[in-house]
Image (cartoon, grey):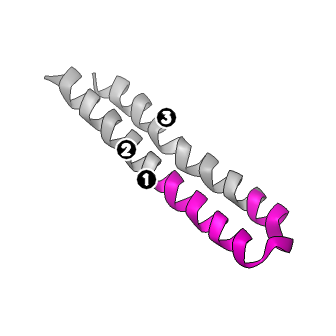
Amino acid sequence: MGALAAGIAVGLAALGAGIGNALIVRGTIEGVSRQPELKNTLQTLMFMGIGLVEALPIIAVVIAFIVM
């Protein structure tokens, strides 16, 4: 039962990260299309945001292993 709960937790964390990454990239593309001169700044912020969002599934995996 614990393995099932851990799998569900990790799967939902990955789903949430995928949605979060899509929203970040969408916002960056919209920003660059409106102000192309800010491309480098927006790209840097996008990579920082994606890094923070990707930390969530990693933390979920660690917590799932601890729970198991």
Pointers 1 and 2 in contact (C-beta within 8 Å): yes
How many marks on residues?
3
Residue type of the residue flagged with mark 2: Leu
User: Residue 20: x percent and y percent?
Assistant: 48, 55
Residue type of the residue flagged with mark 3: Ile
Say which residue appears at 81% left-offset and 65% top-offset.
39
Say which residue appears at 86% left-offset and 73% top-offset.
37
Q: Where 55 falls versus 25 (above or below)?
A: above
Identify the magenta region.
20-43
Query: What residue is pinned by disc 2?
Result: 15
Say which residue appears at 71% left-offset and 78% top-offset.
34
Query: What residue is pinned by disc 1?
Result: 19
Mark 2 or 3, nearer chain start: 2
Nearest to viewer (mark 2 / mark 3)? 2
Q: Which mark is residue 58?
A: 3
Drawn side of residue 36 relative to residue 66, left or right: right
